[in-house]
Image: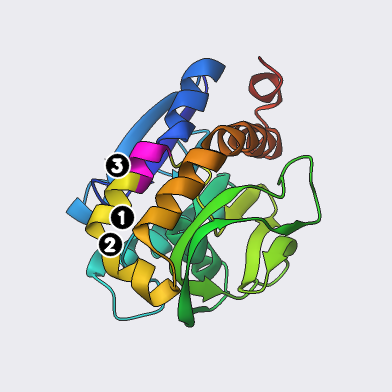
Amino acid sequence: MAHGIVLQTQADAPAGLLADWAARRGIGLETVRVNEHGAYPDPRDPDFVVALGSGATAAGGGPDWVDEEIEWLREADAVALPVLGICFGAQALAAALGGCVRRLATPEVGWITVETNDADRIPAGPWLAWHEDHFTLPPLAYELASNAFGVQAFCHCRHLAVQFHPEVTPAIVRDWTVNDHGDLDRAGTTLEALEQATRRHAAAAARAADRLFDGFAARAGLVAVASRV
């Protein structure tokens, strides 16, 4: 059985659809709560790692665990461990690989589509965006998707990073609207608009997420896993 590590940073940001996908593909997942200073595994042990989102920032001045995660992702890259970075996880991976993370003038919150250079593995959407930071491409990285807010996806060797959230379920989105209501106001949207869009897009987003996760599995070298239905 393929074995992956999930780096989770807060209780309301779990693996969601990623966990469902892994169960269907026969992949074992182990969660490490990095914000609670959980013990990181030896990066040579798992087959891949997924770095999830967070309300913390990787742009500097965040809690100590942020720098710890970035340093561990740098070690993972050094031993060629494939990484899937999601939102904050993508920003942390970009920082680990030499990119820069900066604050956005306006948060990007809501359901979006992206301009993709690889529609088979990075569908245009719909995707749920919820972030206040963005990143520059690390050296030698290839941009896979973008929109008006900047880079939305990149690949680097066997790594894949996406600024949006392919893992979210309607329940996760509901939790975020309760816990981060201020982000909606700053992004110029409303709770009602987000709830309506979530109901409209959730099923299509789940199908797109399966394609994205399968694409990462293929990039990570788990070809037999990625081909299963």
**Type of amino acid under label 3:** Val
At 37% from the left and 47% from the top, the residue drawn is 173
At 40% from the left and 63% from the top, the residue drawn is 71
**Is residue 222 found left or right of 187 in the rendered image?**
right
Give the mark, 2 or 3, whose residue is nearer the N terminus.
Answer: 3
Give the mark, 1 or 3, whose residue is nearer the N terminus.
Answer: 3
Q: Identify the element where label 3 is drawn.
A: strand
Q: Distance between the residues labelled 2 and 3?
A: 23 Å
Q: Identify the element where label 1 is drawn.
A: helix
Residue 198 magenta-drawn? no
Can you tell which of label 2 and label 3 is closer to the viewer?
2
**Is residue 157 found left or right of 170 in the rendered image?**
right
Q: Indicate which disc residue 177 carries.
A: 1
Q: Is the magenta stretch mostly helix, strand or loop?
A: helix
Q: Distance between the residues labelled 2 and 1?
A: 5 Å
**Type of amino acid under label 2:** Asp
| Quadrant housing residue 112 | bottom right
- Work out whether residue 51 can be spotted: no
Q: Decide: marks 2, 3 in contact (CB < 8 A)?
A: no
Magenta part of the chain: 169-173
At 69% from the left and 58% from the top, the residue drawn is 114
Can you tell which of label 1 and label 3 is closer to the viewer?
1
Residue that numbered label 2 is attached to: 180
Q: Distance between the residues labelled 1 and 3?
A: 24 Å
Q: Where is residue 191 in the image (x, y as percent from the top left)?
A: 35, 57
Numbered label tally: 3
Q: Indicate which disc residue 32 carries.
A: 3
Q: Where is residue 14 in the image (x, y as percent from the top left)?
A: 34, 41
**Type of amino acid under label 1:** Thr
- Up the image or down, 34 lies above or below 169; here it is below
Q: Identify the element where label 2 is drawn.
A: loop
